[in-house]
Amino acid sequence: MDSVSHPIRLQVMANALAGIAEEMGARLIRGSYSANIKERRDCSTALFDAQGACIAQAAHIPVHLGALAEAVRAVVAAGPRPGDVFVLNDPYQGGSHLPDITVVTAIPGLRDPEQVCAYAVNRAHHADIGGMRPGSMPADSTEIWQEGLVIPPLRLAQMTLTGELCWQGDLLRLILANVRNPEQRQGDLQAQVGASAVGVSRFRELLARFGEEETWQLIAGVIAYSRRRMQAQIQALPAGIYTACDYLEGYGDPPEPLRIQVQIEVRGERLRVDFAGTAPATAGNLNAPLAVTRSAVLFALRCLLDPTAPSNVGLEDPIEIVAPPGCLVNAQFPAAVVAGNVETSQRIADVVFKALAPVAGSRAIAQGQGTMNNCVLGNRHFTYYETLGGGQGASRQRPGLDGVHVGMSNTLNTPIEALELEYPLRVLRYELRPDSGGHGRQRGGWGLIRSLQTLQDCTLSLLTDRRHHAPQGEEGGEPGQVGINLVNGDPLPSKISRPLKAGDVLTLYTPGGGAWGAREEEGPGGPK
């Protein structure tokens, strides 16, 4: 067995690549200014080869990671030079939604520093990127320009081999002139570029340690290993076609249900995921670009089929994803997309889980809360953004977890101390929502209750779901409770932007998870 195919060396390389991505993430989190990144960790990091194929990812935000490849390919098409630092957020060029800013840095080769050998990439959610409402996540946008500044792939800086930076000052000034809280935005952008510098230096150290030729041979071996594992898992599924549909809550009161339909065909070592039959794109902002749809599909399939394989392009190769252009999950420019990234992605993952549940075995799970419970409060002086946890769906083996982020999120919460220190807000209530999970043999996870009092006049934007359609159980388990939105005790729709006065109290009850299995009947002697 030659050295580059030896399993120990392949494992060493897989861990080394993942370690670089994780270290990039740690630098980004510790260097950022906003609570959204430094506290909630709403960011992701990865490494790509010179052609734009993913070679490693950190265990960060699912909705970010699956879409990064299209963003890197857009940068590759722009012809970067070694050391170029590109920035973009365009959802129609691999972005997810406008607040998510991606930084892509071209890594110079070791033997030939005049050639790009790889890319260090990160994506972070900025608490504002301009647009019609503070926080850049309006509930009522109807076109992309209302949601903030659109940034195509552009050079933001040039990085030397020693790590020194030469910023494109005009571009930076343009970005900062179009956002709220520009000092915080600048600090977070600098943290993203700093994280890229870590990726550049560590990857070049890896090339020096193993030698450039052997490094790329080992990387190819790791990718092939991931591909074989995914192919083996697909081949183990019974051949056939599996279908499911579910509904997203649209606009109006009651909201219009928006159908998401999936058909998954298992054929040998390959799997085809087709969204024909899905509702057309809406006039609002629940539309998802295909890159976001790809993220949601890959997340669900990885959870169901092989959650521990090295994360790289090899996992994607056996999977084909198609969706009719102009449908809800393949939005076309200039459709508004800010909620598609955070809410529609959740339902896409739900339908993939649901379709394959009959053949997923022990990895099948009841539906979780199915929403990120996006809450934005802000004015010209501050922008607070948070996604709230809820109930996880139960499985055959165990009950659902309580008060956790489910599905396409993966962030932390903002600690109360940090929240009240940074924003003119007061937390009045933060607790689990008792008994909100579905009842069954294994109960669904409980949601949360959070009450915030505003200390300044501001604007509220809510992008939430599962307020009318409850998370469903599996195998006879009962559904979880739907979520509830209140201002001063009065109910609000699932998606709304409206002004608040100082002293108003916003309370969110997040959904519980579905249960697994029917409850055993109680008799005189206990459960039967």
Image (cartoon, helix red, strand yellow):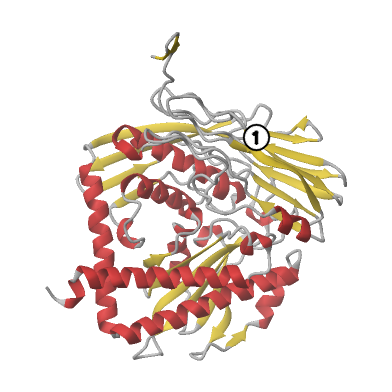
| x and y, in percent, of residue 277 in the image | 43, 34
* Direction top: furthest residue: 524
| Residue shown at 53% from the left, 43% from the top | 344
In this orientation, does residue 8 appear? Answer: yes
- In the rendered view, does 465 fall on the left or right side of 428? left
| x and y, in percent, of residue 219 in the image | 29, 72
On screen, residue 58 above or below 173:
above
| x and y, in percent, of residue 78 in the image | 48, 75
On screen, residue 469 above or below 344:
above
- In the rendered view, does 447 fall on the left or right side of 232? right
| Residue shown at 45% from the left, 84% from the top | 82
Q: On the image, numbered disc 1 is attached to which residue?
A: 251
- In the rendered view, does 50 fall on the left or right side of 439? left
Q: Quadrant of residue 379?
A: bottom right
In this orientation, does residue 131 appear? Answer: no
In the image shown, does 77 or 339 lie closer to the viewer? 339
> Where, quadrant-wise, is the N terminus in this rendering?
bottom left
Estimate how packed mark 1 is, as few (under 14), some (14 to 19) or many (20 or more) residues with alpha carbons within 10 Å.
Answer: many
